[in-house]
Image (spheres, rainbow, N blue to C red):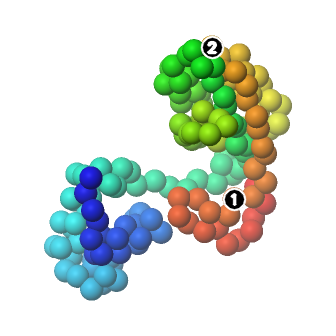
Amino acid sequence: MRIADQLDKQILRILKLDGRASIRDIAKLVNASPATVSRKIKKLEEDNIIKAYVSIVEDDELGKGTRAVLMVRTTGDYDSNQVVDRLTGMDDVCNVFLTMGNYDLILTACTTDEKELYGMINKIRGEEGVLWVDSASIVTRKKVLSMIITDNKEI
């Protein structure tokens, strides 16, 4: 496991807030040369610390404004990874987390409406290896991928 130094942490903090920040701008903010910042970012990518550069998309603007957290419990005699593989292939599943505790998986879903969400939950309940699914509707996003959302826009 690689230990990030202070400069790595500063660069990562900036990239978490703005994945499109230029190397020149980052270099100014961390008081380092662009060559050093470029080298550091390349190393962070090679070491798989930076896995991707992503956009935070306003799904409701695309007709997918109904969001929910789905907590899934799998049967003890079934490989959770097989369930994960099937669920990650579902179009309206946004995130899948393998967890420890009361639930084996936590998903986030983005659907067009409650009816579609209900259908999705029932489909997941019918998957082989799924014992039960609990759900909670998401009303408002406040923080996504380290980005605090301050406009208080209802989702």
Amino acid type assigned to the residue bearing label 1 in the image: Arg
Q: Residue at x 34, y 83 (%)?
A: 29
**Residue at the disc numbered 2:** 128
Label 2 packing within 10 angstroms: few (<14), some (14-19), many (20+)? few
At horizontal 73% and vertical 43% (from top left) the residue drawn is: 68
Please give the residue where the numbered disc 1 appears in the rendered image. Answer: 141
Percent across and percent down for residue 87 are: 58, 27
Q: Is residue 134 left or right of residue 92?
A: right
In front here: 26 or 125? 125
Question: Is residue 14 or residue 153 the one in the foreground?
Answer: 14
Q: Is residue 64 above or below residue 129?
A: below
**Can you tell which of label 2 and label 1 is closer to the viewer?**
2
Residue at x 27%, y 52% (from the top left corner) = 1
Q: Residue 30's quadrant in the figure?
A: bottom left
Mark 2 and mark 1: Cα distance apart in space: 32 Å
* Residue 5, percent from left and from top: 27, 71
| Residue 86 in sight here | no
In depth, the one of 76 and 43 nearer the eye is 76
Which kind of residue does numbered mark 2 sit on?
Glu
